[in-house]
Image (tube, rainbow, N blue to C red):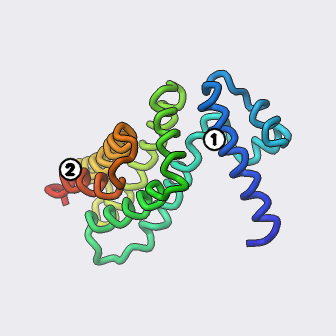
Amino acid sequence: MTLRQLKKEVTRSAIESTGLELFLKHGFDEVRVEDICKAVLVHRRTFFRYFASKEDVVLSPFRRDLAEAGEYLATRPAEESIQDALHALCERVAARYDNDNDRESTLARLRLIESVESLTSAYLKALVDFEYLLRGFIAAKLAERDGNRVWLIGAAAVAAFRVALETWRDTGGEESLQPVIVRNLDVVIAGCV
């Protein structure tokens, strides 16, 4: 990583963590972009180089995971089953969320998403994007371009992931996230693939 890339990553991370801290302390609707910029000592235009909105500050880790999920699924072995590929993807994501450094941040984000309507809507939109990504992957695996089966498997996998995140949030992350997701996946897609 070059020095310039490192500086960009530090700035992005500072905006994100400070924004989340301010939202949790003062309330999402009460914090303005200007408040985040002032706390991080960056200009408003710098904020918008990294984030499209306040909602994006909260949802950016989930969106990064979505982008990485597409890349990761593209590298899975051709002979691997859909269920095994989805297990591997969820293990990868859950490992990051279960990490001590990310656990509290992720739990706080999920609680904030639940309590703010605009965040809930944006989060659900990200889950729809995740479903479309999975449907493309599943269609390629099954050599089907459309059809009920592909849609159902994609929707079921996303529902399993969403419910696992919400269960994990509601229990305060007591259990590792990975087995919660895998159990949910196995319940909803085992008979479909």
Give percent across and percent down for residue 93. 44, 59
* Residue appearing at x 33%, y 67% in the figure: 85
Kind of residue sitting beneath label 1: Val
Secondary structure of the residue carrying numbered label 2: helix
Q: How many numbered callouts?
A: 2
Give percent across and percent down for residue 174. 35, 48
* Residue appearing at x 59%, y 47% in the figure: 60
Task: In the rendered view, tell whether residue 67 sits above or below residue 84.
Answer: above
Q: Is residue 193 left or right of residue 2?
A: left
Q: Is residue 142 visible?
A: no
Kind of residue sitting beneath label 2: Val
* Crowd band around label 1 with a 10 angstrom C-alpha radius: few (<14), some (14–19), many (20+): many
Give percent across and percent down for residue 167. 32, 41
Q: Quadrant of residue 32?
A: top right
Secondary structure of the residue carrying numbered label 1: helix
* Residue appearing at x 75%, y 35% in the figure: 36
Q: Which residue is mark 1?
A: 57
Q: Quadrant of residue 101?
A: bottom right
Q: Is residue 24 visible?
A: yes
Q: Quadrant of the N terminus?
A: bottom right
* Residue appearing at x 20%, y 50% in the figure: 188
Q: Quadrant of the C terminus?
A: bottom left
Q: Nearer the viewer, residue 5 or 109?
A: 109
The label on residue 103 is none
Real-space Cα distance between discs 2 and 1?
31 Å
Q: Is residue 103 left or right of residue 47?
A: left
* Crowd band around label 2 with a 10 angstrom C-alpha radius: few (<14), some (14–19), many (20+): some
- Label 2 or label 1, whichever lies nearer to me, is 1
Do the residues bearing badges 2 and 1 touch, measured as CB atoms within 8 Å?
no
**Residue furthest to the left:** 191
The label on residue 188 is 2
